[in-house]
Amino acid sequence: MTGVAAAPRQERRPLRERVPLGPYGPLGLFVDPRTWRAVPYLLIVMCWGAACTALVVAGTAVSLALTVVWIGFPMLAVVMIVWRGAAMLERRLLRLAFGVSIPDPYAPLTRRRPLGWPRVVIRDRATWKDFCYLALLFPLGTAEFVTLVILGNTTSRLLLTPVDLARHGYAWPLPELDHEVRGTAAALAWAVAGLGVFVVTMYVVRGFALAHAWWGAFMLGTGEKERLVARAAHLRASRARAVDAAEAERRRIERDLHDGAQQRLLAVAMELGRAQVKIDEDPAAAKEMIASAHAGARAAIAELRDLARGIYPAILTDRGLDAALSHLAARAPIPVDVSVEIRDRPPAAVESIAYFIVSESLANMAKHARAERASVVVCREGERVVVEVRDNGVGGAVPTPGGGLAGLADRAATIDGTLTVLSPPGGPTLIRADLPCEW
């Protein structure tokens, strides 16, 4: 399946949004797959951290020592490239282990000066944050590994106390306490204590996972300043696209008025003028001219109505998104299932963008998809309105500059939304819009 994301969101989310907390109860921790995904990472992080720490500390120290001769500078460049690659791998490992998504925060390399990348890398704050993170990964990983090994060993010894008693007639649940167990009741009590230690171990695993994920997101991700700069750049780009889209819409309206309704009204005026001249000498011909002018006036009114509907449909204002989308579906050439799962009406801007996304998607489907059926789903996910349009057509839809899908992406970007197109060759096609909404 091929996926094309139009106008992707460029800003970085705050730490509290990037690190998933998950359930807190013992049963929730036990059934949560994130608890068990974190265990392998916490057990191997000591060895992985030793390699990373040796790379950044020893490699940098040796390279700096050799800068007295020319070999130190290329060696330092290689070490920096390798530790950046190790940091990129660590971000992927954190996503797999803890479910935290940390995009690479590096400054883009300039194309004007291809050989100037060392200067860009050295001046990039993310490079040195990677260095600090990798340098501290070994001691941090060692503390996590030792703690989990102690808790895991204690848990297994306590839980296996009844088994050892049955096999040997006695058990030593904790040799450090120098306490021998020979009774079944005492063995079961130690096993119950083992369950308690197991619950503590799960909380420790979740605590380590959250702490490590937050630390990784802080050191390996985008800082608050960089996030705000990226956010501002994204807003400037989206506003620029909004201005361009509004200007293109204005030119389209002017063209439609000039080429359509204006020409028809001019023809109506000419017909009425001719009828006025002939009304005394040839009433029958004048009657035909008036009828023709009447038909032209009705056609002009229909064009103006369609043009007004294209600007902002009245049914959307009066009856809301559900009725407006149902009206679109009724006019579609194929069956379209509509489901609007929103109780409260979103703001007018969100409703308008959602409506036109569905309208343009259904129009493109009718022209190009050769679909037999389609569906429209509008629902709420948190603080977003999600619009999904699916069809079972031939697929292959790709947003191109100046095309209809790119225009929809620009519409969504005006309120900081995103548009995603999944349309593999052969179909089906999914167009999804995520629109931020303040309820």
Image (spheres, rainbow, N blue to C red):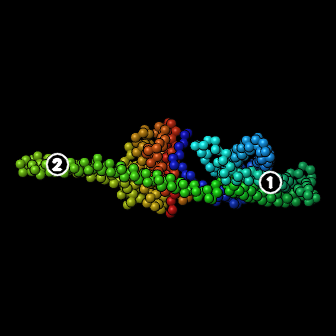
Give the total number of marks visible in the rendering: 2
The image quarter containing residue 22 is bottom right
**Which amino acid is tagged 2?**
Glu
Which comes sooner in the sequence, label 2 or label 1? 1
Q: Position of residue 48 (x, y in %)?
A: 77, 47
Q: Residue furthest top?
A: 426
- Picture layout, residue 342 above or below residue 6: below
Q: Secondary structure at mark 1?
A: helix
Q: Residue at x 14, y 51 (%)?
A: 273
Q: Which residue is mark 1?
A: 139
Q: Is residue 84 visible?
A: yes
Q: Position of residue 2 (x, y in %)?
A: 54, 40
Which image quarter holds the N terminus? Answer: top right
Q: Residue at x 85, y 59 (%)?
A: 190
Q: Nearer the viewer, residue 233 or 97?
A: 233
Amino acid on which the number 1 mark rests in the picture:
Pro
266 or 198: nearer the viewer: 266
Residue sticking out furthest to the bottom: 439
Q: Residue furthest left?
A: 281
Q: Measured from the top left, where is residue 232 in percent x and y?
A: 54, 57
Q: Secondary structure at mark 2?
A: helix
Badge 1 density bin: few <14, some 14–19, many ≥20, Cα 10 Å: some
Number of the label disc, if any, that sits on residue 414: none
Q: Badge 2 local density, few (<14 within 10 Å), some, or many (20+)?
A: many
The CA span between labels 2 and 1 is 91 Å
- Residue 307 location (% of width, % of height): 33, 52
Q: Residue at x 33, y 54 (%)?
A: 308
Left or right of 214? Residue 363 is left
Q: Is residue 296 left or right of residue 436?
A: left
Question: Residue at horizontal 47%, vertical 53%?
Answer: 240
Q: From the image, tell me which residue sits under label 2.
A: 271
